[in-house]
Amino acid sequence: MDEAEVYRRLSEARKEIENYREYGYILVNDILDRAVAQLEAIVLAERFYRNGEPIAYRPSRVLEVAAACLQANSLERLKPVIEAFGIGQPPDQQQFNFGEDTDDD
């Protein structure tokens, strides 16, 4: 993936993050295994709430994990992401802030 593609993808991510208030759930994909488990819990919980579909394995834990991902319950986990993207800063100061650029090549 070239640099232009990276910045295009980051720009798209920024747009999604700026609109986080429009989403029912927030999933921060920082640790893959956790994000996969959270996504699965959200899907199972929504199937349960919308269709009454039973949750086969550890239903109370699944609902607990999904509830933790609700937008209202995710603001602390979302805060560092918002800061990394410079959201909420004046437009002339907005930039991607992902740490120092190290050139280890």
Image: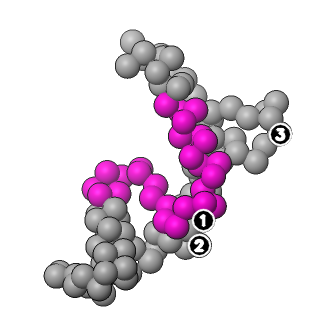
Residue 35 among magenta residues = yes
Q: Secondary structure at mark 2?
A: helix
Q: Residue 67, relative to residue 90: is it above or below?
A: below
Q: Which mark is residue 72?
A: 2
- In primary-sequence order, the first of circles 3 and 2 is 2
- Contact between marks 1 and 2 (CB within 8 A): the answer is yes
**What is the quadrant of the N terminus in the image?**
top left
Q: Quadrant of residue 62?
A: bottom left
Residue 98 percent location from the top left of the image: 56, 35
Q: Which residue is mark 1?
A: 75
> What amino acid does circle 2 point to?
Ala
Callouts 1 and 3 close, C-beta under 8 Å: no
Assess whether mark 2 and mark 3 are in contact (beta carbons under 8 angstroms): no
Report the span colored magenta.
Answer: 9-36
| Residue neighbourhood size for the residue with mark 2, other residues' Cα within 10 Å, grouped as few (<14), some (14–19), many (≥20) | few
Q: Tell me the CA gap for discs 3 and 2.
A: 25 Å
Q: Residue furthest top?
A: 105
Name the residue carrying label 3: 90
Horizontal and vertical percent position of residue 33: 28, 56
Report whether residue 8 is seen. Answer: yes
How many badges with numbers are in the image? 3
Rounded to the nearest angstrom, the CA distance separating label 1 from label 3 is 21 Å
Q: Is residue 89 magenta?
A: no
Q: Going by the image, does 65 lie left or right of 5? A: left
